[in-house]
Image (cartoon, coloured by chain):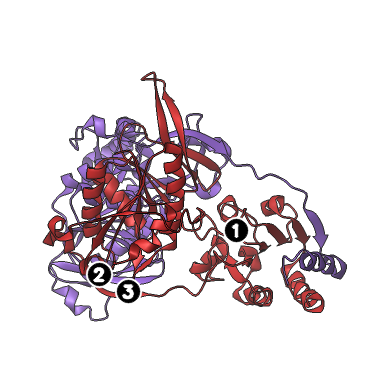
Chain colours: A red, B purple
C-alpha cells in the first residue's frame, strides 16, 4: 500500500520527541503524496499511547504491546518491524537518528534489501529521470543530508528497491499538531505470534538512563564555546553569561573533544541541532559541521579574535576581541541595563 | 578496562576475532573539489586515514588478546589497493592476519552493498567468535554497515560498545554507550559489535612489529615492486597480504558495487555561507554596551 510509515520510540509510556517530529515530517510527505500516514510502536503498557501519536495526523497505528519489548532490543523490534513493513509495503519509512533508530534501521534495510539514508536534514518528494532506462520515476523521496564533513549537501534517492528509508536527527524537523482529534485506526500486533526465543538472546543486565538535564533544543538563548575558549575555566565565564541571560551553554565538537564541556552539550551536525532566539558563539571558528546545527538561530553573535572566522559570515554581530575581555563586559553591561 | 578479576580470562578458550576496518578520506580536511561531477568522491584529492572508530575496535580486540592468550585477530578491509595501509597498520599494532577485499567491481558501493561484500568475506574467515568494527566511518557517519553485516550473517548485534566487562565460555558482556546513559548487555558467541569512540584509544605501533611487517605487501602492490621485495616475499610468504576479488568471496555481482546499491546520489550542492550585514564591533565598552542595549530593546534578552 502507498503510505508513509514512522517507527516511534517509546519509554515509560512516553513517545520520544524525535518520533513526534518525524510524524510531523511524515505527515507533510504523506500530504504531498496524497497517501495515509502510518506509525508503529513497540513497548510495554502502551494502552492509550495513541493519544501522543494520533494528533500528528496518523491514519493507522500498529501497536506491539509486551513487557518483553521494553527497553528496546534490536532483534525483537527488527522482527516486528520487518513483518509489518513486508505486509504493509509502505513507500517511505522514517526513523530517528538516535541510539535506537541507528541500531534498528540499518538492520531492517538489510532484511528488506532496501536503501537507507542516514541523518537527513531535509525530506522532500520529487521525480527523477533514469537516463539509462529512459524512465521517469515519480514521487520519490528526496533524502537530503550534509556529507563530507558538511561541505556539501547530497540529495540521495532510491528508485528501484523499496521501501525508501531515512533517519533524521532530533530537533531537525518541526513538530506540529495536525489535529487534536484526528481519528487513528489502531492495529494490535500479535507479538507472541511473531517473536521467537532466539530474538531474545541478547540480554540487558543493567541500564542507567538519565533524562539529561540539558535541554539545548528548547533553550531560547544559547552561549556556545569552541576550541578557542581555551580551557574549562574560561568556559565558566560562558556558563555565567548563560545563567544570567536565562540560557544554556553549548559547545562545538572541538570543545567537546578537548574536554572543555560535556558531550551532551555538543551543537552541530553530530550533536544537537538548535534554533534559539539568540546564539552567542565564543571562540567558535564556524566549521560547517557546527553551523549546520545552529544557523537557524534568529540572532547570532560571534566573539572571535580571528576577523576571518567563517562563523562571522552568518553572524548579526561580530565582536573582534578576546572573549576573556568581551564576556565579562557583556555581563557587566547586561546587569547595568536590564530592567 | 576489564574486570579486575583477570584470572577468569586465563582459563578461557582463545577467541577468533575479525576486526572490520576502513580506510577513509580525511573528511576533516576537505575542499569542494573533492567531489566528482557525478557526486561520488574523488578519493585522489584527499589524504586517507584509518577510520578513527575502527582504531577503537582494533584496540578492543587487542585488549581481549592480551587477556586471553592464543586469541587470534584477523583484520579485514575492503577498498582500493591503497587500503593495504590498513592491513599494515593492523600488523604494526598487533593483529595476526590481514585480508583485503579489493576489486574494481566493488566500487561505488553504498552501505547495503558494502555489508553484503564484507559479510561474504567474513563467511570465508569462519569460524569466528566475534566480529568488531567501529561504530561509524567519518566519510559518511552512517553507522549502518555494522548492523547490516550482522543481519547478513544472521548474528546478534551489540552496537556502541564502550567496554568489555566479562567474557564467559559462551557469552560476552559489554557496556554500551547510549545517548542518555549506558546499558550493560550479554550476547552469545558468535556476535557482532560496533565500538563507540568513547572506548579506549588504540595503542601505538609496536617498534618490533613495524620492523617485521613494514614489507607486507598486497598482490597488487607486488606487481609493481622491485626485485628485492619480490624476493623477500618468496622467502617470507606471510608478508603477502591476501587480496580477495569477487570470485574469491563468491559474491553475486548484482549485489555488489553500484548495481547492489539502492541509494544513489541525485545531486550535490556545495554549501556557501551567505554573507549578511553583520555589525562589526570591537571589545570597547562603548561597542559592547551599545549591543547589549539593542538586544534588550529588541527583547532578544532581558
Residue A16 in percent (x, y) is at 40, 63
Q: Chain of mark 2?
A: B
Q: Nearer the viewer, residue B175 or B230?
A: B175
Q: Residues within 10 Å of mark 2 (few under 14, many from 20)?
A: many
Q: Nearer the viewer, residue B64 or B205?
A: B64
Of badges 1 and 3, nearer the viewer stands 1
Kindly indicate whether the residue at mark 2 contacts the one at mark 3 (C-beta within 8 angstroms). no
Measured Cα–Cα span from mark 2 to mark 1: 36 Å
Mark toward the start of the polypeptide (3 vs 2): 3
Q: Which residue is mark 1?
A: A275
Most distant residue in the bottom direction: B5
On residue A118, which mark appears? none
Q: Quadrant of residue A324?
A: bottom right
Residue B96 in percent (x, y) is at 24, 55
Most distant residue in the top direction: A134
Above or below, comparing residue A243 to residue B272 in the picture: below
Q: Quadrant of the N terminus of chain A?
A: top left
Q: Chain of mark 3?
A: B
On residue B1, which mark appears? 3
Measured Cα–Cα span from mark 1 to mark 3: 39 Å
Above or below, comparing residue A15 to residue B104 in the picture: below
Above or below, comparing residue B117 to residue B141 in the picture: above
Above or below, comparing residue B179 to residue A188 in the picture: below
Q: Which residue is mark 2?
A: B185
Amino acid at each position: 500500500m502507498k503510505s508513509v510509515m514512522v517507527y516511534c520510540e517509546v519509554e515509560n509510556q512516553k513517545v520520544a520527541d524525535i518520533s513526534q517530529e518525524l510524524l510531523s515530517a511524515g505527515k507533510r510527505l504523506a500530504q504531498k503524496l496524497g497517501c495515509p500516514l502510518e506509525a508503529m510502536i513497540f513497548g510495554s503498557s502502551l494502552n492509550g499511547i495513541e493519544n501522543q501519536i494520533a494528533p500528528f495526523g496518523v491514519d493507522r497505528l500498529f501497536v506491539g504491546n509486551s513487557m518483553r519489548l521494553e527497553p528496546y532490543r534490536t532483534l525483537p523490534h527488527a522482527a516486528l518491524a520487518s513483518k509489518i513493513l513486508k505486509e504493509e509495503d509502505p513507500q517511505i519509512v522514517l526513523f530517528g537518528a538516535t541510539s535506537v533508530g541507528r541500531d534498528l534501521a540499518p538492520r531492517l534495510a538489510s532484511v528488506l534489501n532496501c536503501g537507507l539514508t542516514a541523518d537527513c536534514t531535509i525530506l522532500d518528494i520529487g521525480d527523477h529521470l533514469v537516463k539509462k532506462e529512459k524512465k521517469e520515476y515519480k514521487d520519490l523521496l528526496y533524502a537530503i543530508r550534509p556529507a563530507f564533513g558538511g561541505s556539501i549537501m547530497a540529495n540521495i534517492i532510491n528508485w528501484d528497491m523499496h521501501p525508501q528509508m531515512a533517519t533524521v536527527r532530533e530537533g531537525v524537523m518541526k513538530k506540529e499538531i495536525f489535529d487534536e482529534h484526528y481519528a487513528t485506526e489502531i492495529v494490535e500486533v500479535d507479538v507472541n505470534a511473531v517473536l521467537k526465543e532466539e530474538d531474545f538472546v541478547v540480554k540487558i543486565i543493567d541500564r542507567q538512563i538519565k533524562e539529561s538535564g540539558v535541554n539545548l533544543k528548547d533553550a531560547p538563548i544559547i552561549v556556545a564555546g569552541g576550541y578557542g575558549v581555551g580551557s574549562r575555566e574560561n568556559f565558566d565565564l560562558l556558563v555565567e553569561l548563560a545563567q544570567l541571560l536565562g540560557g544554556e551553554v553549548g559547545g562545538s565538537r572541538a570543545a567537546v573533544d578537548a574536554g572543555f564541556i560535556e558531550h551532551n552539550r555538543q551543537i552541530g551536525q553530530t550533536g544537537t541541532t538548535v534554533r534559539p532566539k539568540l546564539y552567542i558563539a565564543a571562540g567558535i571558528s564556524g566549521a560547517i559541521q557546527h553551523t549546520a546545527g545552529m544557523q537557524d538561530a534568529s540572532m547570532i553573535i560571534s566573539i572571535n579574535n580571528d576577523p576571518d572566522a567563517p562563523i562571522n559570515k552568518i553572524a548579526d554581530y561580530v565582536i573582534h576581541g578576546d572573549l576573556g575581555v568581551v564576556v565579562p563586559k557583556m555581563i557587566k553591561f547586561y546587569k547595568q541595563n536590564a530592567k | 578496562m576489564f574486570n579486575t578479576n583477570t584470572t577468569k580470562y586465563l582459563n578461557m578458550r582463545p577467541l577468533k576475532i575479525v576486526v572490520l576496518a576502513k580506510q577513509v578520506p580525511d573528511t576533516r580536511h576537505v575542499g569542494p573539489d573533492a567531489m566528482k561531477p557525478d557526486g561520488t568522491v574523488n578519493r585522489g584529492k584527499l589524504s586517507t586515514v584509518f577510520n578513527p572508530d575502527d582504531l577503537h575496535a582494533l584496540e578492543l580486540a587487542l585488549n581481549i588478546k592480551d587477556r586471553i592468550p592464543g586469541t587470534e585477530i584477523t583484520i579485514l578491509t575492503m577498498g582500493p589497493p591503497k587500503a593495504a595501509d590498513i592491513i599494515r597498520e593492523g600488523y604494526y599494532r598487533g593483529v595476526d592476519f590481514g585480508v583485503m577485499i579489493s576489486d574494481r567491481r566493488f566500487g561505488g558501493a553504498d552501505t547495503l552493498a558494502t555489508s553484503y561484500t564484507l559479510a561474504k568475506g567474513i563467511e570465508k574467515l569462519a569460524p569466528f567468535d566475534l566480529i568488531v568494527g567501529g561504530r561509524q566511518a567519518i566519510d559518511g557517519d552512517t553507522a549502518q554497515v555494522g548492523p547490516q553485516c550482522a543481519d547478513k550473517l544472521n548474528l546478534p548485534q551489540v552496537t556502541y560498545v564502550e567496554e568489555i566487562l566479562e567474557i564467559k565460555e559462551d557469552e560476552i558482556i559489554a557496556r554500551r554507550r547510549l545517548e542518555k546513559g549506558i546499558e550493560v548487555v550479554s550476547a552469545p558467541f558468535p556476535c557482532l559489535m560496533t565500538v563507540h569512540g568513547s572506548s579506549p584509544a588504540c595503542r601505538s605501533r609496536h617498534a618490533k612489529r613495524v620492523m617485521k611487517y613494514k614489507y607486507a605487501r598486497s598482490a597488487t602492490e607486488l606487481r609493481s615492486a622491485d626485485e628485492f621485495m619480490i624476493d623477500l616475499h618468496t622467502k617470507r610468504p606471510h608478508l603477502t597480504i591476501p587480496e580477495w576479488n569477487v570470485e574469491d568471496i563468491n559474491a553475486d555481482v548484482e549485489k555488489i558495487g553500484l548495481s547492489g546499491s539502492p541509494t544513489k546520489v541525485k545531486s550535490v550542492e556545495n554549501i556557501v555561507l551567505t554573507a549578511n550585514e553583520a555589525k562589526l564591533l570591537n571589545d570597547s565598552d562603548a561597542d559592547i554596551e551599545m549591543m547589549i542595549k539593542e538586544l534588550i530593546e529588541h527583547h532578544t534578552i532581558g
